Image: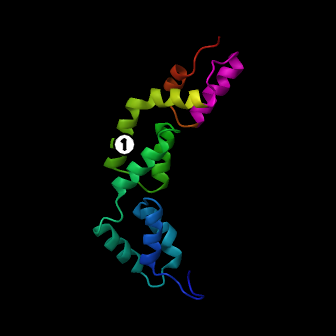
């Protein structure tokens, strides 16, 4: 337990955040900027952590993709990666790998949420909107949601 008045160092705060889950460098900068007392101190700490491979954007991309791909489509995952400040080759590779499984993932999400074919056009539209809101492409959604009984 922290003593009253004790403030962990920037490095301590960063390590605590990294122990909970993978973070991108941009995320850590955003979260720790308010705790920086000396200009440039945060950049030094993050450089050191990145050099020691505590911060690895490739691992952060993989973590988000593995955690979210069971529930979300590639568009929504890409949006989350961009919000975390991740871009580049690792994101492009992850998006390419998700494209191959997009239909099967959409069908699984649909099955968990609905499980039965819609009874009317209104029900089908509702099911399609649900998958679209999860970030699945419209062509995949049309194929994933069964026709009306």
Where is residue 32? Give x, y as percent: 49, 72
Residue 142: which quarter of the image?
top right
Q: Is residue 56 above or below residue 38?
A: above
Asked if residue 91 lies left or right of residue 82, the reply is left
Nearer to us in this view, 96 or 18? 18
Circle 1 residues within 10 Å: few <14, some 14–19, many ≥20: some
Indicate left or right for 131 with 93 as reference: right
Residue 55, percent from left and from top: 36, 64
- Tag 1 residue: 94
- Residue 35 vs residue 66: left or right? right
User: For the residue labelled by badge 1, is the local secondary structure a helix, a strand or a loop?
Assistant: helix
Which residues, given as a range, are shown in magenta? 113-133
User: Where does the image place residue 23, in percent across and percent down from the top left?
Assistant: 43, 60
Residue at the (60%, 88%) spot, across then down: 4
Prevailing SS of the magenta stretch: helix
Tell me which residue sits at (47%, 40%) in the image. Answer: 69
């Amino acid at each position: 337990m922290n003593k009253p008045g004790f403030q962990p160092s920037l490095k301590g705060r960063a390590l605590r955040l990294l122990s909970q889950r993978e973070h991108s460098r941009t995320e850590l900068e955003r979260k720790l900027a308010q705790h920086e007392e000396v200009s440039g101190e945060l950049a030094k700490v993050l450089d050191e952590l990145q050099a020691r491979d505590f911060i690895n954007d490739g691992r952060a991309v993989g973590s988000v993709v593995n955690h979210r791909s069971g529930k979300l489509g590639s568009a929504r995952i890409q949006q989350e990666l961009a919000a975390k400040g991740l871009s580049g080759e690792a994101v492009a590779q992850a998006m390419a790998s998700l494209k191959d499984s997009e239909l099967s993932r959409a069908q699984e999400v649909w099955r968990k949420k609905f499980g039965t074919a819609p009874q009317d056009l209104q029900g089908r539209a509702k099911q399609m909107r649900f998958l679209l809101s999860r970030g699945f492409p419209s062509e995949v959604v049309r194929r994933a949601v069964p026709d009306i009984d």
